[in-house]
Image (cartoon, rainbow, N blue to C red):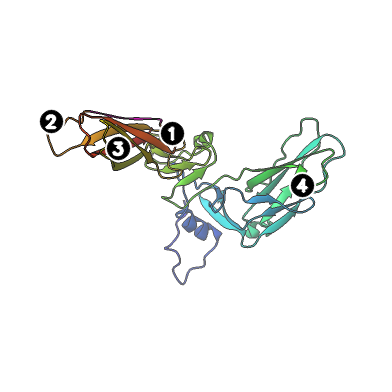
Amino acid sequence: MMEFPGFPSNDFDWHFEETGAAFAGLVLRDRTGIPRSGVLPSSANLLTKGAGWTVQVAPHVAVRAKGRLVLIGGATEPVTVDVGAAPAANARIDVIYTRPADVGAGEEAVSVGVVIGIPGAVPAKPAIPGGAVELGTVRSASGNTGIVQATLTNTSPFTAAAGGVLVVRAVADLNSADLVDGARAFVLATGREYLRRGGAWERVPIVWATTGAIPGTAQAQGSVTVSFPAGLFPSAPAVTVTPQTTVPGSADVKMGAASITASACAVYLGRLSNQLTSFSLIAVLA
């Protein structure tokens, strides 16, 4: 068992074992207390295509877990990585990574690196050094004359500050996040938030409410279009509309929503008068 004093108290000979343990308390951890390795989110796409056969790596901060300790590193300026020309035959997969180096253990103090794969008819993704965090892959094929023709895929896993929202790329990525109950996650592919409850991830419903009115006309029927906030719903929600009146027994008895999409819906009213009619609306995407 290792104990460490309050960080950063004076008059103590601080080493990685103590500072790594102290900083681990600031990083998202699983239910066993192991910190989660990954990139602190600043962009979903840290890699972009450069000139020739180069890839541009955006500034980033990465977390590397070593047991219950962490190393925090990355790049404060853009980094250019050269993956080399496409193979003469078949295809090749290269992997770009970042690794907060443990210099005290003899590791080279280089934040970003690349592992060039072996060409093949069905190329395999090469392994990256221990403790490294994958940022993305480049798949080049015979005949490609530059990076613009290759396939660049951003794959970096994310981590977060302790108590923060974990960002993941796909719902399947939640399987690797065995966090404590009460933790929250956001899935980039679906734009949905999840809550950890009872050792499992539950999708958090999106709820939006508003009020409106259908003007009085010479007709007993009326309608109005209600627009949802831009980007709130990734797909069409369920909508409930309720008429509002200060007169019990009002003749305005039929109201509902139709033509529901992810961005708007129409509210229709059938009434026995031509008076302005107010309503409340709740939209829910489970």
Say left or right for 57 vs 63. right
- In this rendering, the label closer to the viewer, 3 or 4: 3
- Residue designated by label 3: 281
Q: Amino acid at mark 3?
A: Leu
What is the CA distance from the residue labelled 2 to the residue labelled 1?
A: 32 Å
Q: Which residues are magenta?
A: 254-259
Q: Circle 4 sits on which residue?
A: 147
The 10 Å Cα crowd at callout 4, few under 14, some 14 to 19, many 20 or more, is many
Query: Disc 3, disc 2: CB below 8 Å?
Result: no
Mark 2 surroundings: few (<14), some (14-19) or many (≥20) residues within 10 A: few
Q: How many marks?
A: 4
Which residue carries the number 2 mark? Answer: 249
Q: Quadrant of residue 180?
A: top left
Mark 1 neighbour density, 10 Å: few (under 14) some (14–19) many (20 or more): some
Secondary structure predominantly adopted by residues drawn in magenta: strand
Counting residues from the start of the chain, the first of labels 3 and 2 encountered is 2
Q: Which of pointers 3 and 2 indicates the residue nearer the eye? A: 2
Residue farthest along the right direction in this orientation: 88
* Residue in the image at 30% along x and 37% along y: 281
Q: Farthest front residue? A: 218
Residue at 83% from the left image edge and 46% from the top image edge:
85
Return the residue at label 1.
Answer: 261
